[in-house]
Image (tube, helix red, strand yellow):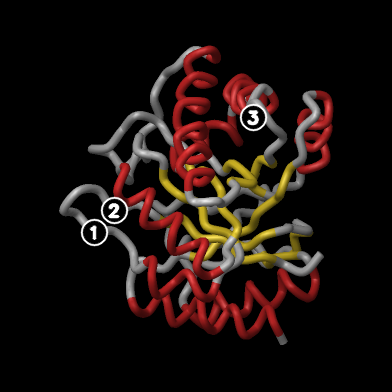
Amino acid sequence: MPLLLNCDLGESFGAWTMGMDEAVMPHIDQANIACGFHAGDHLVMQRTLKLAGEHGVMIGAHPGYPDLVGFGRRSMSHPPEEIMSLMHYQVSALDGMAKSQGLEMQYVKPHGALYNDMMADAVVRRAVMESVASFYRPVKLMLLATPWAEEHRAEAERLGIELWFEAFADRCYDDDGRLLSRAKSGAVHSRKKMLAQASQLKNEGAVTTVGGHKLILNADTLCVHGDNSEGVKAISDIRKLIDE
């Protein structure tokens, strides 16, 4: 399967605008649409779904912790049953809104701190996976591609769900296979390094870590960010690179 491009979209809220969704949508394969807890609202969700439909872009739910002020980037302590409920609430909202436009939500990608917690904590990951497994119809779950991908795939298979593994074009990887902390120098790539990493992921299924080691990821989809004009131009360049 060719490497797909995904982007977090629909993250505006009320009078506050986040991202350049209309400029990004023509270049991507998958739209991860915010569901109202960390960003997005009913009108933004509706408009983003319509835009995805117009461009034939695959639709995914992008649920997060109930943290509008912190944009879902702060970890919150929730028991597993509450994680499952907040996931179902958000995913069901996007699923229903998509269906009303004749569209179909195909996957779930947790946002921000929920995504990071899922990758670091087996209890949180189990709750997220169980929420997807117990949804009323089959949908895929997007996880970070790491050296532990086969373990995560086995966890998912036991619950009867399929995974898409994602890598990041603009983030540097630590030698342990995780994303390099944003607190460290070089955590976010320049355009030149971003394009080089996208090319390596496409051609080798790998990235070069901060320590110069080759890390095999075999990702299915590549996350790109387009919250400014420079980012949109970079997405356009990555699209051309992937399509070559």
Screen quadrant of the N terminus: bottom right
Mark 2 = which residue?
12
CB under 8 Å between callouts 3 and 1? no
Query: Which of the marked residues, 3 or 1, is nearer the chain's N terminus?
Result: 1
Classify mark 2: residues with Cα within 10 Å, few (<14), some (14-19) or many (20+).
Answer: many
Amino acid at the residue labelled 2: Ser
Asked whether 111 or 133 is in front, the reply is 133
Q: Are marks 3 and 2 in contact (CB under 8 Å)?
A: no
Find out whether the residues at labels 2 and 1 contact each other: C-beta distance under 8 Å: yes
Q: CA distance from mark 3 to mark 1?
A: 29 Å
Q: Which residue is mark 3?
A: 132
**Residue shown at 61%/19% (left/top)?**
123
- Lower position in the chain sequence, tag 3 or tag 2: 2
Please name the residue that numbered disc 1 is placed on: 17
- Residue at horizontal 45%, vertical 42%? 97
Is residue 210 something one can see in this rendering? no
Amino acid at circle 3: Val
Residue at figure coordinates x 41%, y 45% from the top left = 34
Label 2 and label 1: CA atoms lie apart by 5 Å
Residue 204 visible? The answer is yes
The amino acid type found where label 1 is placed reads Thr
Q: Position of residue 225 (x, y in %)?
A: 45, 65
Label 3 neighbour load within 10 Å: few <14, some 14-19, many 20+: many
Can you say whether 189 is above or below 153 in the image? below
Nearer to us in this view, 5 or 151: 5
Percent position (x, y) of residue 5?
Answer: 61, 66
Which residue appears at 69% of the width and 31% of the height?
Answer: 137
Determine whether the residue tagged by mark 3 lies in a helix, strand or loop.
Answer: helix
